[in-house]
Image (cartoon, helix red, strand yellow):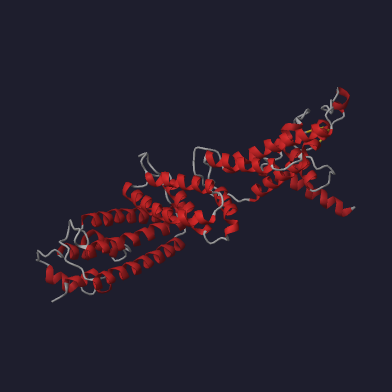
Amino acid sequence: MISRLDFYFPTGLRKMLPVAKQAFCHSNDFFTPILINVIIMLPHYILEWFDLTINTILNPQVSKIPSISDEQLAQIANDADKERDKLQSHLRGQVFAITSRAEIELFIRQYHSALIILLDRAHANCDLASSGNIVVRQACKTLVNCLDDLLGFIETHYAHFLGLDERVPVTYLSVLRAEIKQRLDALRIKLHRRIADKTLSELVFKTLYEFTDGSSGRKVTFREMLYRKELVKGLEELLTRPERNVNKALNALLIYRNFNKKAYLEYYTRKIVEKVNRCSSLTQKMEELFLAYKEFNQMHRKTGVKLNPHYADVKEVIGNWFVEEINFLEKKYQFQINPAEQMPRVNSEKAASKIRLALNSDQIAILLRAAVDVGMLYIRSVHFVFKTVVPFLASTKEENLSWDSLRKRSYQAENKDKVIVIAILEKAIAYVQTY
């Protein structure tokens, strides 16, 4: 007689099909649906074991599940791990083998959707399993964890092939919220011990807990869900940093992940203002602000991600704030050193003798700022250089250039203008080498 529970395990499943088909062909035994499912399954269906185990063997609506021993539970857990690893390897191989992006996208989305459906069923099995059958419930939870690992694998490595603006299924969203909340609860205590500024960490945790709460009832897209999963992962990695660098590392993480919450933007700029205001002289304040701006510009930002998709990027908002603050301090500094200085007036005679550059206004702005930054002009104030030089210049299209407008645009250079300026400078270098 064949042991019924042998059918739980994929290792001998196919070898036993001929015998099983004959033995149970006319049986009313609860395993008959299992055999039918197994027989009709396609040989290359990589989710076969998960499908069979979740939809039939451990589904209380289909089968009257017998008691499972601890050994059989261990076997299910072991087989689930093997099937998970096999599926990950299969996905890597298929993505590598398929050459068409459209086909890869279809392939990834199909498996991702199938895994979500299986996860929903596995959770339903957990809820339906009798409260007294602890081992069966544990088996269901083991499968839930494996499926969650597989979904996490796809969402980490192949997120760009998913429909990121599609709605996350309700059951899957519930699972993710519970998982993120559990990770946050563990993180909050550990991170609070290591971070000096509790205001910043609380701001981040409050935002993430609002997501796990889910009381708003609004739809959540895969893009929003993946953002929060990656942010939590980044917070967990902060625990490996030396304690003295955690504050700085947290800000770098939030800039990188484009954490564009208005409360955070206000927090960041307020901290810079407090630091600048601790300086006594105006020169020191300018140096402190320039240093903060330099550090901010050196922080990387991941393209295509943001906390709030309907609000401006962190780099844009804080970058503009720095430009305005620098402009204010430069004007204040200029007024201190020469209160009576007036804006240079360009009469009609001077206008006729303006130097016309074969560049547009944005390219002139880049060139002037570079001249200051490399020390070619022995003046540290960008404000003063633009105010003094620009009235005597004309571009290819404009006769009268606004020095203040050019100065501001020099901090927001576009790639196409930088390429043109670099090409002209390289041409100049080639000429210099021939002199």
Residue 53 lies left or right of residue 354; in this view the side is left
In the image, residue 226 sits, relative to residue 215, either above or below, namely below
- Horizontal and vertical percent for residue 418? 71, 44
- Horizontal and vertical percent for residue 355? 84, 34
Look at the image and tell me whether residue 203 can be seen.
yes
- Res 277 → quadrant: top right
- Horizontal and vertical percent for residue 282? 76, 39
Please tell me which residue lies in front, 90 or 235. 235
Residue visible at 82% across and 27% down in the picture: 343
Look at the image and tell me whether residue 360 can be seen.
no
- Res 329 → quadrant: top right
Q: How many marks?
A: 0
Residue 110 lies left or right of residue 19; in this view the side is right
Residue visible at 74% across and 47% down in the picture: 422
Residue sitting at the far right: 435
Residue visible at 84% across and 43% down in the picture: 377
Quadrant into which the N terminus falls: bottom left
In the image, residue 24 sits, relative to residue 397, either above or below, namely below
Residue sitting at the far top: 348
Residue 37 lies left or right of residue 152; in this view the side is left
- Horizontal and vertical percent for residue 348? 86, 22
- Res 325 → quadrant: top right
In the image, residue 354 sits, relative to residue 52, either above or below, namely above
Please tell me which residue lies in front, 275 or 65. 275
Residue sitting at the far bottom: 1
Please tell me which residue lies in front, 186 or 167. 186
